[in-house]
Structures are given as structure tokens and as C-alpha cells.
Image (tube, helix red, strand yellow):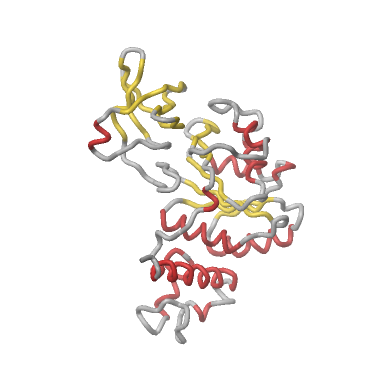
């Protein structure tokens, strides 16, 4: 009997595959080693019964692949900032957004703790909705905005990311309130206030909808992006590059620069400042990598 399913967890060399509402403990065939293809969490696979055990016999083409942590078929990155306590870190948010654009994975911005500073939340929302990003305001403790967020999770594999203290755990607990996950433990884990998980794991919100638990993901780096290409992933910049005097304009020190001419008008000062800082960081890393 062959079944098509999704890998939701990996422990040692065992793969836990959800298929037709059940979870199967599987091993992978040696053929994947010769192909240098190791199944990862999120992979869509075919499993085959072998007596009382199951083997993964096929891994389907991947989309939305993350190298660190390894994960396949991620469709959505949800970036959480708080209006206050901690102060919103827009440099981190812009870094995350650039990474999402680089990976071609849809980003959603959640502004949490709006009860602490609604004015600031509105200011942030204006910056990013003007660019074209979807922004949801929430107060996780009062479950405000949770329904809108849950709607965005439908038919997606989503990862939550954000600095410590912004309320990711509270948001996730609100989403799963009254729900049953595969092992029923995501809420308990998050309520501990201390994430001890060391590998990626998918938790089912509803049919075809998952949240990925990815420890350490908020600390990712974007060194995969060549510094000369960074401007492409600040998507509002692209329509103004044709106004640059030089074809190889990096939009940093050049005098006649179409992007710099738009700062404070169609490009926010905070976004350009993030670009400048990340450009210098990537440039320095690339020039000193040897």
C-alpha cells in the first residue's frame, strides 16, 4: 500500500509522515543517499508499507526551501514586531523581508501588543502597506486580530519569526486555543516560556495548514544575498532605479540616484536606512570572507 503524505517531524533517522489523517513512522530508502537527497520536514513524500513498517520511496519537487534550518515547501513567513516592550526593531523586520523576497516566499507582518502603543502600530502599518505588504495588528492576550491571522494560515505552511519578547508564543497559543495538534503539545511547550526544541516540527492548524516550529530561526543571517543585489529585495526601490545616472548604481554614495531622490517621498527614511546598514554589512562580509 502506497500513501502520499507530508513529513512533519524527524527524530534521529526516523521520519514522521502525516498521511490521510494518520501519522506513520518511516525510514528512508538508501537510494536517497546515492542521489544526495535527504528528506526534510515539509517534504511531500510517498510512503510504502513494508511488513509492519513504512519506507519513504519518493520525495516530490520542493518549493520554498530553507537551508538553515532545513525545511521544504514553506509558503509563508510571518514576521512579528511589537508596538512597544520591546520597541519595534524595523531593521530586523527589513532584513527579514529582504530574505523573504530573496527566497520568493510570501511575507506577512504582524504588529502585536497594539494596546501598548496604537499610534506607533499605525505608523508602522502605513509604511509597509504603502509598499504592498499585508499587515495585521494584534493583541494576542485579548485575541484581537487572531481571526484575521488564522485566515492567512489556511492552505499554507507558515513560520513565525521575530525578536524575543514580541509575543510569538502568545500568538501561537491563541491560534491553537481549542485546537488539537498532532501531539497536542504546542501550547504546553510555549506556555513553559522556554523553547527547548532543537529541530523543525510542523503543527497542524487545520487541513493543509501548518505552523512550523523552527528554533533559532529569528537569528538567521542573509549572507546568501550578494550585496550588489540587495536593492532588488527592497521591492519599492525597483521602480526608481531607471532614474539613476549610472547603470551600476549601488544607491549609497552616488550623487544622481533615483532611489535617494525618493527618500522621504515614496521611500521611507527608515527603509532606506535599513538598506544602507544591511548593504554595508553584506559588503563587509563578502569582501572579508577569505
Q: Nearer the viewer, residue 147 or 104?
A: 104
Q: Quadrant of residue 190?
A: top right
* Residue occupying the far right of the picture: 116
Q: Nearer the viewer, residue 11 or 244?
A: 11
Where residue 246 sits: x, y (%)? 37, 83
Above or below, 178 against 121 in this view is above
Where residue 208 sits: x, y (%)? 47, 33
Where residue 233 sits: x, y (%)? 44, 63
Above or below, 141 against 18 in this view is below
Q: Residue at x 58, y 37 (%)?
A: 196
* Residue occupying the far front of the picture: 290
Q: Quadrant of the C terminus?
A: bottom left
Tell me if 224 is positioned left or right of 91 in this view: left
* Residue occupying the far bottom of the picture: 255
Where residue 204 sits: x, y (%)? 52, 32
Q: Quadrant of the N terminus?
A: top left
* Label total for image: 0
Q: Residue at x 56, y 72 (%)?
A: 273
Q: Residue at x 61, y 53 (%)?
A: 163
Q: Quadrant of residue 149?
A: top right
Q: Nearer the viewer, residue 54 or 121?
A: 54
Tell me if 83 is positioned left or right of 267 in this view: right
Q: Quadrant of residue 73?
A: top left
Amino acid at each position: 500500500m502506497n500513501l502520499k503524505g507530508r513529513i512533519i517531524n524527524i527524530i534521529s533517522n526516523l521520519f514522521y509522515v502525516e498521511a490521510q489523517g494518520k501519522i506513520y513512522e518511516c525510514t528512508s530508502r538508501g537510494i536517497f543517499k546515492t542521489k544526495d537527497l535527504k528528506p526534510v520536514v515539509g517534504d511531500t513524500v510517498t510512503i510504502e508499507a513494508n511488513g509492519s513498517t513504512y519506507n519513504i520511496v519518493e520525495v516530490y519537487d520542493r518549493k520554498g526551501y530553507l537551508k538553515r534550518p532545513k525545511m521544504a515547501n514553506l509558503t509563508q513567513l510571518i514576521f512579528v514586531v511589537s508596538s512597544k516592550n520591546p520597541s519595534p526593531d524595523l531593521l530586523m523586520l527589513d532584513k527579514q523581508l529582504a530574505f523573504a523576497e530573496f527566497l520568493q516566499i510570501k511575507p506577512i507582518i504582524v504588529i502585536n501588543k497594539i494596546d501598548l502603543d496604537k499610534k506607533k502600530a499605525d505608523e508602522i502599518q502605513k509604511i509597509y502597506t504603502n509598499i504592498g505588504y499585508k499587515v495585521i495588528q494584534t493583541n494576542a492576550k485579548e485575541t484581537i486580530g487572531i481571526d484575521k491571522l488564522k485566515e492567512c494560515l489556511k492552505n499554507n505552511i507558515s513560520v513565525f519569526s521575530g525578536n524575543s519578547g514580541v509575543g510569538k508564543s502568545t500568538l501561537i497559543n491563541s491560534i491553537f486555543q481549542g485546537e488539537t495538534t498532532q501531539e497536542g503539545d504546542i501550547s504546553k511547550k510555549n506556555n513553559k516560556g522556554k523553547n527547548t526544541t532543537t529541530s523543525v516540527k510542523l503543527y497542524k492548524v487545520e487541513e493543509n495548514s501548518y505552523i512550523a516550529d523552527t528554533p533559532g530561526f529569528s537569528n538567521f543571517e542573509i549572507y546568501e544575498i550578494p550585496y550588489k543585489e540587495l536593492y532588488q529585495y527592497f521591492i519599492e526601490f525597483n521602480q526608481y532605479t531607471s532614474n539613476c545616472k549610472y547603470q551600476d548604481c549601488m544607491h549609497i554614495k552616488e550623487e544622481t540616484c533615483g532611489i535617494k531622490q525618493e527618500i522621504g517621498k515614496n521611500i521611507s527614511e527608515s527603509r532606506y536606512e535599513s538598506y544602507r546598514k544591511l548593504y554595508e554589512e553584506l559588503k563587509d562580509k563578502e569582501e572579508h570572507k577569505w
